[in-house]
Image (cartoon, rainbow, N blue to C red):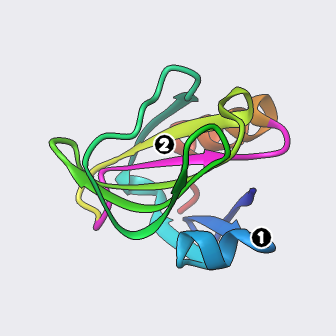
Amino acid sequence: MTEVSISENKLIIEVKGWHKLWAFKSRLEVPIENLIGARPATSERVKGFRVPGTYIPWVITAGTYYGKEGRVFWDVCNLNHAIAIDLRENRYSKFVIEVQKPDQTLTLIRQAIQYPSS
């Protein structure tokens, strides 16, 4: 599970609890101007090689995956609570993360993209 916030014109993703161990990350930051969009991730599927990370089918997908889409960060146990965040000019091409309140998180991200602070 992750928590998403916006601070100092950056999107900040905090990886919580044991997920830090499984995902090999505790925090990700990306400038708002590098965000393309965000959407529910219910149809997302893992593609590519996992380096490093954890994959247990139907239990958890966490860590960095390399494939045709580039580098994608995953931290998901339940796709029904997951969102996908598309990025440009960043180390990652996409984040696929599970959040407690997907609709609120999507609204937060979309508002930050639409109305970035100066």
Which stretch appears magenta? 91-101
Task: Give yes or no for residue 39 being in the magenta stretch.
Answer: no
Marks 1 and 2, Cα distance to the nearest angstrom?
18 Å
Question: Residue at position x 27%, y 51% from top?
Answer: 88
Q: Can residue 62 be seen in this view?
A: yes
Mark nearest the camera among 1 and 2 is: 1
Left/right placement of residue 102 relative to residue 113 reads right
Check if mark 1's residue and mark 2's residue have beta carbons within 8 Å. Answer: no
Estimate the x, y position of residue 30 in percent, counting from the top left. 46, 66
Q: Residues within 10 Å of mark 1 (few under 14, many from 20)?
A: some
Quarter occupied by the N terminus? bottom right
Give the secondary structure at mark 1.
Answer: loop
Query: At label 1, which amino acid type do we have?
Result: Lys
Q: Indicate which disc residue 107 carries.
A: none
Label 2 CA crowd tier, 10 Å (few <14, some 14–19, many 20+)? many
**What is the number of the mark on residue 85?**
2
- First in sequence: mark 1 vs mark 2: 1
Query: What amino acid type is highlighted by mark number 2?
Result: Ile
State the SS at label 2.
Answer: strand
Left or right for 84, reference 97: left
Q: Which residue is drawn at 65% across and 37% down?
A: 82
The location of residue 2, given as percent across then percent down, is 72, 59
Question: Where is mark 1, residue-wise?
Answer: 16
Instruction: Give the residue at the far top of this rendering.
Output: 43
Residue visible at 61% across and 71% down in the picture: 22
Residue at 55 percent of width and 27 percent of height: 39
